[in-house]
């Protein structure tokens, strides 16, 4: 019986810990090829250069050999982990926006296209203030793994749906107006319009579901990585008390 219980826990403990994972990033993190910056109120408070130099509030911290080794493990762990989280979120947003932008390409006047693109840009800015990916630069705002899951499931879907319906409705309106004044005298019914919108929304939701499944499949691994980073961070804080006020990886109460 004890052996059966041990085997059960061996296989299913990762799933249980993933569902109950309360690990979070308490500060914003910027990852670039040469630096990692820990942000608070849009200011850099901790900076790691080339995985082995540490600055706290602009002051260079002298490190012992063991400190440097721990710092390198911490820095490399963030470099492997943060870009992967950011990419899952960014890919989900870009998937929906690219479908919407492709639909109105070449339709309407230049002024109308500029208006639609401005709407998309404004929406993108609102969503992507929490996740930024630009070439090999990444930013992750303070949040937990549960909040990322909520973003993909409960925030992104309805907002992309609303954006798609609003933009597609405007595009079809402009197209009908243009065709009404053409020799074709072509008209398209509202039912046909919204059927096309529904198909686009279904396509967007299908892609977002795939991203949510990807996150769910990796959630146990992500939680484990964050717990490992938390342990390294605690060791660094014990050796370098200046870091205690910057608890980047933490358990959210």
Image (tube, grey):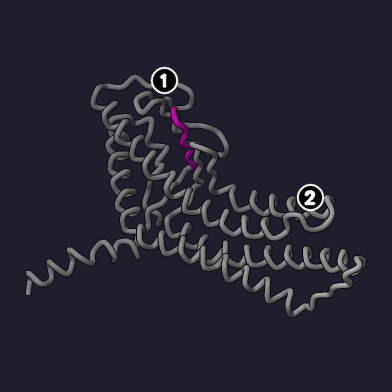
Left or right of 149 in this view: 112: right
The number of callouts visible is 2
Relative vertical location of residue 45 with respect to residue 21 in this rendering, above or below: above
* Label 1, residues with CA under 10 Å away: few <14, some 14-19, many ≥20: few
C-beta proximity under 8 Å, tags 1 and 2? no
Residue 213 percent coordinates (x, y)? 42, 64
Asked if residue 105 is among those painted magenta in the image, a careful observer would answer no
> In 3D space, how far apart are the residues under numbered discs 1 and 2 (Cα atoms)?
47 Å
Rendering quarter of residue 164: bottom right
Residue at left offset 48%, top offset 36%: 136
Q: Nearer the viewer, residue 129 or 22?
A: 129
Per the image, label 2 sits on a secondary structure element best described as: helix
Instruction: Specify start and end residues of the magenta stretch as a single range.
Output: 28-34
Q: Quadrant of the C terminus?
A: bottom left
Asked if residue 31 is among those painted magenta in the image, a careful observer would answer yes
The circle drawn on residue 242 is none
Q: Name the N-terminal-most of marks 1 and 2.
A: 1
Q: Which residue is mark 2?
A: 114
Relative vertical location of residue 105 with respect to residue 239 in this rendering, above or below: below
Residue 247 percent coordinates (x, y)? 40, 41
Residue at left offset 31%, top offset 22%: 63
Q: Which residue is mark 1?
A: 60
* Label 2, residues with CA under 10 Å away: few <14, some 14-19, many ≥20: few
């Amino acid at each position: 019986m004890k052996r059966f219980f041990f085997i059960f826990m061996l296989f299913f403990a990762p799933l249980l810990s993933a569902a109950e994972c309360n690990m979070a990033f308490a500060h914003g993190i910027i990852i670039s090829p040469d630096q990692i910056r820990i942000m608070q109120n849009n200011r850099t408070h901790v900076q790691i250069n080339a995985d082995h130099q540490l600055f706290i509030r602009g002051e260079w911290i002298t490190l012992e050999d063991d400190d440097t080794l721990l710092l390198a493990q911490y820095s490399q762990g963030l470099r492997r982990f943060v870009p992967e989280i950011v990419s899952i979120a960014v890919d989900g947003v870009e998937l929906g926006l690219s479908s919407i932008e492709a639909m109105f390409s070449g339709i309407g006047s230049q002024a109308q296209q500029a208006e639609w693109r401005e709407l998309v840009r404004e929406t993108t800015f609102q969503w992507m203030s929490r996740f930024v990916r630009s070439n090999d630069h990444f930013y992750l705002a303070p949040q937990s793994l549960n909040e990322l899951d909520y973003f993909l499931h409960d925030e992104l879907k309805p907002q992309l749906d609303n954006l798609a319906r609003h933009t597609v409705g405007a595009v079809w309106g402009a197209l009908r107006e243009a065709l009404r004044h053409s020799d074709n005298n072509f008209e398209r019914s509202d039912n046909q319009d919204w059927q096309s919108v529904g198909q686009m929304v279904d396509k967007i939701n299908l892609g977002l579901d795939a991203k949510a499944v990807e996150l769910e499949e990796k959630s146990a691994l992500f939680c484990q990585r964050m717990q490992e980073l938390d342990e390294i961070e605690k060791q660094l804080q014990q050796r370098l008390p200046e870091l205690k006020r910057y608890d980047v990886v933490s358990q959210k109460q």
